[in-house]
Image: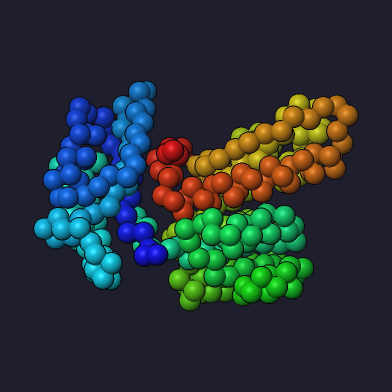
């Protein structure tokens, strides 16, 4: 069975104006492309239009691809990507980011001692759920070393202490550069990445926080929630920014609790939420379904 043809995904946003959907679809149609999926949203208060469109570009002249021609497709994709980007910026006056299904971002997971999110992510990746390649696990502890190697993954131990934090982050960044990592996932990594780290890395970092942000930010959120007597606990996956636990939110979920639940009950219930919320956020990101604007996101169907 031949591989499915590669597609392009465009994420667009800018001032709302009549005819944007029709003009984008018309551009693709006129060049022999085939739209596979399109979704859009309008922020009425801000007057901003958002769109995600995925399509299969045609070869030069619009001829359909034969099995033998599939090897030519990457060249065709590069040309189509550049042409659509210019069209979106110059004609539609929209901000645009374009991804290709032919590209598989390289992913690194950061962990500490908790293993539930780590195991869940790796098993989903092994099952083929993610449009990316998991290339390394980096930890400030050695607790998960055997488990990581058992999955056939590379384990990198970089210890961190207050006096050595700068040196540790330098080593992490050097490793990420060597591995050409384009996404870091913090799977209950119990260290705060510095603003300098995030700036120097230059690619997205997805974090899972074990509360329904913006409630109970910072440390020991389950203890905070229990002390407050909440009836719902939650988990939040968000992009990491220089402001702790305040980055754009990708996904959230909640579970009900009562006065009968102690802190350990909240932690146990929360683990399931954390796994599901983080897994979904990573999948949406790798599929090009998340558009960040300001400190908010639009997550397309």
Image position, residue 12 (x, y; %): 30, 42
User: Which residue of the protein is positioned furthest toward the top in this rendering?
Assistant: 45
Please indicate whether residue 163 sits to the left or right of residue 54 in the image. right
Compared to residue 234, the image places residue 113 above or below, namely below
Image position, residue 58 (x, y; %): 20, 55
- How many numbered callouts? 0
Image position, residue 157 (x, y; %): 67, 73
Residue, x 21% and y 49% (percent of image)?
33
Instruction: Place residue 269 in its image quadrant.
Output: top right
Residue, x 68% and y 74% (percent of image)?
149
Residue, x 52% and y 42% (percent of image)?
250
Instruction: Place residue 185 in its image quadrant.
Output: bottom right
Work out whether residue 105 or residue 57 is closer to the camera in this orientation and state it: 57
Residue, x 14% and y 55% (percent of image)?
62
Where's the N terminus, which quadrant?
A: bottom left
Compared to residue 144, the image places residue 43 above or below, namely above
Image position, residue 115 (x, y; %): 73, 59
Where's the C terminus, which quadrant?
A: top left
């Amino acid at each position: 069975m031949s591989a499915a043809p590669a597609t392009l995904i465009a994420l667009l946003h800018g001032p709302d104006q009549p005819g944007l959907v029709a003009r984008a679809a018309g551009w693709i149609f006129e060049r022999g492309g085939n739209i596979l999926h399109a979704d859009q949203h309008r922020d009425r208060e801000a007057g901003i239009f958002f769109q995600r469109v995925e399509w299969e570009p045609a070869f030069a002249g619009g001829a359909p691809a034969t099995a033998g021609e599939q090897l030519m497709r990457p060249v065709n994709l590069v040309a189509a990507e550049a042409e659509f980007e210019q069209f979106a910026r110059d004609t539609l006056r929209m901000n645009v980011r374009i991804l290709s299904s032919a590209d598989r971002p390289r992913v690194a997971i950061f962990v500490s001692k908790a293993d539930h999110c780590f195991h869940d992510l790796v098993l989903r990746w092994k099952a083929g759920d993610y449009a990316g390649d998991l290339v390394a696990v980096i930890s400030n502890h050695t607790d998960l070393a055997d488990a990581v190697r058992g999955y056939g993954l590379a384990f990198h131990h970089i210890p961190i202490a207050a006096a050595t934090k700068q040196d540790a982050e330098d080593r992490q960044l050097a490793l990420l550069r060597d591995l050409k990592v384009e996404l870091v996932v913090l799977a209950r990594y119990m260290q705060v990445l510095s603003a300098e780290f995030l700036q120097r890395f230059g690619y997205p970092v997805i974090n899972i926080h074990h509360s329904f942000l913006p409630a109970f930010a910072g440390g020991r959120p389950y203890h905070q929630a229990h002390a407050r007597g909440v009836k719902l606990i939650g988990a939040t996956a968000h992009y990491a920014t220089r402001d702790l636990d305040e980055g754009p939110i990708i996904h959230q979920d909640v579970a009900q609790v009562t006065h009968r639940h102690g802190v350990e009950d909240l932690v146990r219930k929360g683990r399931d939420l954390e796994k599901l919320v983080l897994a979904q956020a990573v999948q949406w990101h790798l599929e090009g379904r998340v558009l960040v604007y300001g400190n908010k996101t639009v997550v397309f169907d």
